[in-house]
Image: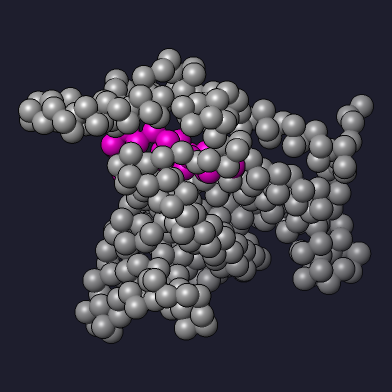
Amino acid sequence: MVVYLLRRSVTMALTLLAISALVFIVIKLPPGDYLSNQIDELRAQGDAAAAAKAEFLRQQYGLDRPVWEQYLAWIGFMPGPNGWSGLLQGDWGWSFEFQRPVNEVVGSALGLTIVVNIATVLFIHLVAIPIAIYSATRQYSFGDYAATLIGYLGLATPNFLLALILLFYLNRWFGVSIGGMMDPKYANAAMSMDKLQSIASHLVAPVIVIGLSGTAAMIRRMRANLLDELQKQYTVTARAKGMRPLPALLKYPFRMALNPFVADIGNLLPHLVSGSVLVSLVLSLPTVGPVLLQALKQQDQYLAGFILMFVAVLTVIGMLISDLLLAALDPRIRFGKRG
């Protein structure tokens, strides 16, 4: 296990290095950058002093250097205009649009994004698995048809549309505002039990909206996998030998049917971040999705680059977690040499 973790750590580091290069290249593909565009706009307006200041900032942050030098300085492999101050040194860069360090722009948003994602993943699994088990073990029953209908509705309903519907009707019928992640009075307050309760109450709506399509898809896939496993010879043999139905279901077919979903944990986390951008805009959620969208539109390269690297880190960590869970779930999977 130790050797495997060391090997995976090296692989994860190399993967993140390759992703960082691709992220930086993609961000730099459009011509210009935030400051260059600002300089052109100021010059067109005849504001020479402001344009000179923007040009000074462009040189100060090394945006006049070749792309490969900008990349190495951003990562921290070579000194930049401010010395050794890249991602490896804990410097996330400077947001030109917000005129603040990146860590101040996304600091609270990162924590809220992680909270929303973890809550959504738990919601998907806690809701989808019992429904899928019930549907598979009672095939063609009324409950099975109801679960199928819910699944199709969940897959067909855009999450941003559901967010708009909830936002409007909950406020109209019950006078409840589900926008944001907490009541406005707690925005700048220190963490307390009242603030935690406010966050928890506001967390319900975005978790349901973001997780609905994933829950519906998991119900359909889990049901299909379980039906396939229940027809296999080892399940029939276990029942023929007198094993009780519930242990026979949970010990073998359920574990095998769960494998694809555990393997998808690494893909689920970044998908939730990218797929919740519209929901975050509709519900005014202070997550990194809207910030990333704005940074990409404005070519705020260090802000966009860091958020994309944050999503990449979520992906590789999710992949590692899924591999460890698969080894614990399936006895056929072992960490070791093949041969």
Q: Residue at x 28, y 84 (%)?
A: 174
Q: Position of 2 compared to 199: left or right?
A: right
Q: Residue at x 43, y 15 (%)?
A: 66
Decide whether the magenta segment is chiefly helix, strand or loop: helix
Residue 301's quadrant in the figure?
top left
* Residue placed most toward the observer, 48 or 160: 48
Asked if one can make out residue 50 in the rendered structure from this viewpoint, the answer is yes
**Residue 123: where, in percent of width, then height?**
55, 66
**Residue 289: where, in percent of width, then height?**
40, 49
Residue 181's quadrant in the figure?
bottom left
Asked if one can make out residue 267 in the rendered structure from this viewpoint, the answer is no
**Residue 302: where, in percent of width, then height?**
42, 36
Q: Position of 233 compared to 144: left or right?
A: right
Tell me, yes or no, whether the highlighted magenta stretch contains residue 299: yes
- In the displayed structure, 67 sits above or below 247; it is above
Q: What range is drawn magenta here? A: 293-313
Q: Residue at x 50, y 41 (%)?
A: 92
Q: Residue at x 29, y 32 (%)?
A: 34
* Residue found at the very far top of the displayed protein: 66
* Residue placed most toward the observer, 23 or 91: 91
Q: How is the image coloured?
A: one colour
**Residue 85: where, in percent of width, then height?**
54, 34
Tell me, yes or no, whether the highlighted magenta stretch contains residue 333: no
* Residue placed most toward the observer, 192 or 150: 192
- In the displayed structure, 203 sits above or below 82; it is below
Count of numbered circles on the image: 0
